[in-house]
Image (cartoon, rainbow, N blue to C red):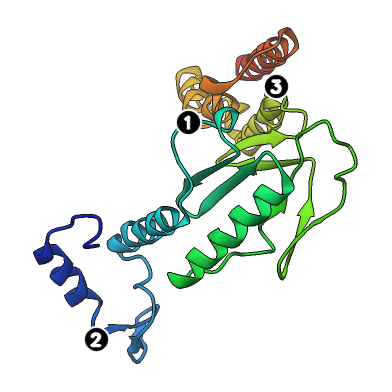
Amino acid sequence: MMEFGIPPKLIRLVKTTMTNVQCSVQIQYHLLQPISTTCGVRQGDALACLLFNMALEKVIWDLGIQTRRTIFFKTVQILAYANDIDLMARTISGLNEAFLNLEKSARNMGLVINQEKTVYMNSGKDTTLHEDLAIGNYVFKRVDSFKYLGTMVNKMNSRSVEMNPQPIMASKAYYGLQNHMKSTNISRKIKTLLYKTLIRPVLTYGAETWMLSRMNIVLVFLSVKSFGEFMAQ
């Protein structure tokens, strides 16, 4: 925290709140015996996210990868938001070196890389890189697509694919409210409010970043039209 320029007074206050901490679990009206927290932060603590983000920021600093500009102008790029990290490189050797440095820097901060939730994807034209990727003691499963911060990323670099699940998810949201939408006791005004509040946001989630093709525009239009027909019943 001192390296980030945080005033010493705030650092002392944080240390005070994290020292000699005891937590208790309440089951209905019964409060269990307190448990001493000697490692990590308190569950649900407002400082937990802030402290973790600072620890991860320190890991990125120590990694030494230039965070400015994009992969088009350098050999390695890292994207990090909360505990989701995307490591990109032009070559396998560059990826190996960057990952090993990341793993070492994270270990120094007490952080561990989750191998089960980490995947590897090759988006280049080389079709021979179809096996799982082994780096050090880690083996990462090769995939053709993965979701990063709610956005589908695929090896063909096609942005149109990422919005395909949205109409399906919107349909699931509608069928969860089907009894309300078809009820004659609920006014059309309330049904419209339910649609705008609970269904339309699901359909248009992340729409600001969509690269719409004519097919996708038609798909969204048909989804909106079908919901309107259901509400009219």
Q: CA distance from mark 3 to mark 1?
A: 25 Å
Camera-side residue of 216 and 15: 15
Residue 31 against residue 8 in the figure, above or below: below
Find residue 20 and name its label.
2
Residue 197 against residue 130 in the figure, above or below: above
Foreground: disc 1 or disc 2: 1
Residue where numbered disc 3 is placed: 160
Measuring 66% from the left and 58% from the top, which residue is drawn there?
117
Residue type beneath disc 3: Ser
Residue type beneath disc 1: Arg
Residue 17 against residue 87 in the figure, above or below: below
Residue 195 against residue 39 in the figure, above or below: above
Quarter of the figure with residue 103: bottom right
Which secondary structure, mark 2?
loop
Q: Earlier in the sequence, mark 1 or mark 2?
A: 2
Whether pointer 3 and pointer 1 mark residues with C-beta atoms closer than 8 Å, the reply is no
Residue where numbered disc 1 is placed: 69
Residue type beneath disc 2: Asn
Residue 201 in percent (x, y) is at 52, 28
Residue placed furthest toward the right: 128
Measuring 47% from the left and 55% from the top, which residue is drawn there?
63
Q: Which quarter shows the C terminus?
A: top right
Residue 43 in percent (x, y) is at 38, 70
Which secondary structure, mark 1?
loop
Whether pointer 1 and pointer 2 mark residues with C-beta atoms closer than 8 Å, the reply is no
In this picture, residue 91 sits left or right of residue 10: right
Q: Which quarter shows the N terminus?
A: bottom left
Camera-side residue of 187 and 151: 151
Measuring 43% from the left and 69% from the top, which residue is drawn there?
109
Measuring 56% from the left and 34% from the top, which residue is drawn there?
74
